[in-house]
Image (spheres, rainbow, N blue to C red):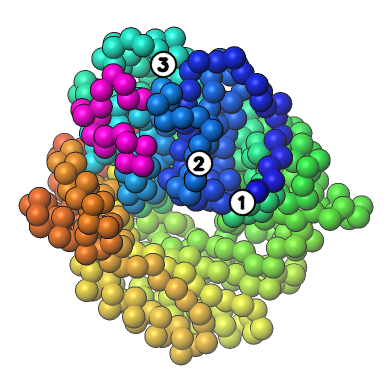
Amino acid sequence: MNKETFLYPAIHTKNADFNMWLAFPGPYSFAMSSLGFLWMFKSIDELEDVNVERIYSDTKTTVLHKESINLFGFSFSFDTDFLTIFSMLERFDIPLKSSERSEEHPFVFAGGPVVSANPEPYKDFFDFVIIGDGEDVNLKVVEICRCNKGKPRDYVLTELSKLEGVYVPKFGSRTINKLTKKLSECIYTPILSDGAFFKNTFILEVSRGCANRCGFCLASYLNLPLRFMPYEELINVVNLGLGKTNKIALLGAQISAHPHFKDICKYIYDRISKGEKIEMSVSSLRVDAITPDVVKTLVAAGQKNSTLAIEAGSERLRKVINKNVSEEQIFNAVRIARDNGLKGLKFYGMLGLPTETQEDLDEIIKLAEKLKTEFKGFDISFGFSSFVPKPHTPFQWCGREKTKSLEDKSNFIKKELHKLGVSSSVSSIKWDYWQAVLSRGDGSFTDFLIDVYKKGGKIGAFKSAAKLHNINTDYYAYNDFNLEDRLPWDFIELRPGKDFLIKEHNRLLYNN
């Protein structure tokens, strides 16, 4: 039995007749390290008139009976999560297609980055979808469903469709504004668990969004504008967490850009200096934001290694993707890391970026060789994924490089780095291909996805299902889309809008 510690006054006895499942399409350990999932649960759990239960892919038994469930929500963070979502729906005898559900079935909905970016491949499986930051609208959704319990499904869906940020596929793809929350309260781990992947770790969100706006990066564009939590609020939340555990983690795409990041680190460092045993980790560091004080804090808090995303080996290609980091800055960052106690750094890069040439790959090898030579004894490693075009980014129109070509590049990189004694890893090129297909998919995917699931969800299942349903997957993965094309996800309004993305697309690809 996993031990859980609640950091909020949970209501354990409720006199409520509205029942909800909040589902994470993965095991308990992953769910209990998912900040968004846990925070949404906390918000709903604090309602006196709603019974809410967490369930996972490895849930054996439930407290609430399936016949009593009125609302069934899913966190949808990764493209292949649909496989587990289908499995969980089938387990509880709920039809996969929303059109096949009767008045007796619960409403099924989803939120998260995948469906916020492009819900169209999955639109026939959910009664409604939350687009963007869901902290506030989630509670409105629950309230509408609770207050209208027992009323016809279409009536409830009509009421839900009136909420900003809620997409009801049955009523068509009207313009939906992506929800963007002002960060007035700090999101943190509300339930600590010794069964979590990050055991008993208190995670807190320091910032949301990223001002770098790399041309390929969905996380950046989907979460604009860059927002920071107020320093005083962060310190209060840090104190709350450290009152229950000695392990904390700072989360955010650009946490080191926080105007008080050094102050946050100093606060932790001072507490450690006074004898407290605190373990602290950060999600990543910016190359141009590594300072001695920050590294000293991480080392004092038990962190031995960190990660730096440089994305490409050549300055030319880094400019193309809007990652304006010089080689001098990279070396300076490594020097500061080594001189202040870190044992190693892992560099993240991407293969197959638009305009990439063999010379750009050679530059990765040269960079690794220079780093290895200058920083003897310091652990240098590399991790790579391959470029996947994502909606709402300047590179959404760019087709992916052919799989064979990318596999050749992957083999070249691994072989050449191995010669230097530098360890490296590359994500599965074949799986990245299918991620690209799903990312740029549309409403024609319904039966294709069901068949992929029924055939077992492996790569072979994707291939045979595509053939069976006459889906030209190469079109979605490889094609360069025209800038004038109407894209499946264009009905979702983000700021900055499509005109800005077109300007960035042209600036990055043709003016660098």
Tell me the crowding category of disc 2: few under 14, some 14 to 19, or many 20 or more residues within 10 angstroms, Cα based. Answer: few
- Identify the main secondary structure in magenta: loop
Q: Amino acid at mark 2?
A: Thr
Tell me the crowding category of disc 3: few under 14, some 14 to 19, or many 20 or more residues within 10 angstroms, Cα based. Answer: many
Look at mark 2 in the image and give the residue it sits on.
61
Classify residue 85 by image quadrant: top left
> What distance separates the C-alpha of mark 1 from that of mark 2?
19 Å
> Looking at this view, is 510 or 245 the one in front?
245
Look at mark 3 in the image and give the residue it sits on.
145
Indicate whether 56 appears above or below 229.
Answer: below
Residue 431 x %, y %: 30, 62
Residue for point 21% across, 29% down: 100
Q: At numbered mark 1, what does the secondary structure look like: helix, strand or loop? A: loop
Looking at marks 2 and 3 on the same chain, the residue that comes earlier in the sequence is marked by 2
The stretch in magenta equals 90-106
Q: Residue 196: which disc? A: 1
Q: Amino acid at mark 3?
A: Cys
